[in-house]
Image: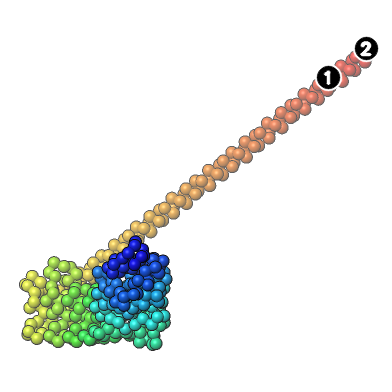
Amino acid sequence: MASIGGLQGPKALLDSVLSAVTRGDVHTLRELKVAFLSINENVEKCTDSSGNTIAHLALSKDPSTLSFVVEEYGADINAPNLLGRTPLHEAVRSNLSACCKYLLEQKADQTVSSTTLSTPFHTAASCGSVECLELLVQYSDDKKSKVNEADKNKCTALHKCAYDGDIRVSKWLLKNGATVDAKDVHDTTPLLVAVKMGREDIVDLLLESGADVNQKDSHNNRAVHYCASRCLPKILKRLVQSGASVAVQNEEFNNPLHLAAIHQRGDSNEWENLVVDLVRFGCDLKQENASSKVPEAYVGRALKHLFTHDEVRRRQESDALKQKGLTEKKKSEADTRAELIAEKKAQLAAKEQRIKEEEERRHREAEDRHRAEEDARTRVEEILEAKRLEEEEARRAKAKAAKGK
């Protein structure tokens, strides 16, 4: 075949097409079209090492190459690559909204799941592609169903955002009707996922959106259990403030204090604070689990004092003293600041008074100089006038004398 670069064999032809698609070279694709389509299997065989078809490789900000290979080459818009991702998956991953819109106009399948069980909607949510999310909803039959679309494990986009997604997308999902307490196959809600992952920002958002703080998964673990096992004292406090109970047990009859002890971090102040908070919030110190063990049975002697109400009281008293000391310190600092401010104001007032007095002195001196100059000028004028009169009198006398002669 006489074409780009001369006569080309089957592999060279496929390589040329792949290269042209990747470059967005529609002119070359147009020249190769007849030879390429002369073999029916070429469209299916023309893939790169990752299994990407010419439809995958044609994706860019400008959809012209994509539309050409779909309409002129017959590229399959629903063909998956080795990761199970269709061109629509890849378009939303890179937030290529123009290509996303074109594929949706061509009726691309929105229900295909990748090897990670993500539909294009889930992928867009995980990648923060809000513009593509809006397009996917726009081209769906039921907006609410699309927003709550679940994968084979019943995970929704909100679950995936709680795992490692963008809070901006989570807000968008909730605003557009995402079910805040949706459950996957393990009865795990987005809040449980967010707590597991230590996502304080997502936890706050879900709590503000009305998430059930006492929801349990299929193993009867609640959010407070995950706080205990992962040492998340800040999130624990947020949950308790939102109504979470720590007087709960999972399927092995472990309460949060059991899990904190089992996953102990003896060299961590955070862990110690977590244990004390769990006791303070009402965890039963003497509750036995399925192994007939109380929480303190899982820690060494050096840490057992943490699992007592006495320790809670001691720390509360210590905290109260610290707080009192901080309050007194703040008051002392405030008093010192007030004194400094008063002193500065006094200094400023004194400076302003000195400036005022100096200006008044200069004004008086200027007036005195002006008066002295006026007096001197008047005296000179008087002297000159007297001299003029004297000279005038002398001239008259001289004239009179001359006339008498």
Q: Earlier in the sequence, mark 2 or mark 1?
A: 1
* x then y, percent, for residue 173: 36, 80
Instruction: Name the disc covering residue 394, or none.
Output: 1
Report x, y in % for residue 183.
Answer: 26, 86
Q: Which residue is mark 2?
A: 405
Q: Nearer the viewer, residue 390 or 362?
A: 362
Residue 330 is labelled as none
Q: Please say whether residue 405 is visible from this viewpoint.
A: yes
Name the secondary structure under disc 1: helix
Q: CA distance from mark 2 to mark 1?
A: 17 Å
Is 39 in front, or is 235? 39
Task: List x then y, in percent, for residue 15.
Answer: 30, 66
Q: Residue at x 93, y 15 (%)?
A: 403
For this orientation, the residue located farthest to the right is 404
Q: Give left or right: position of 203 versus 65.
A: left
Residue drawn at x 71%, y 32% is: 378
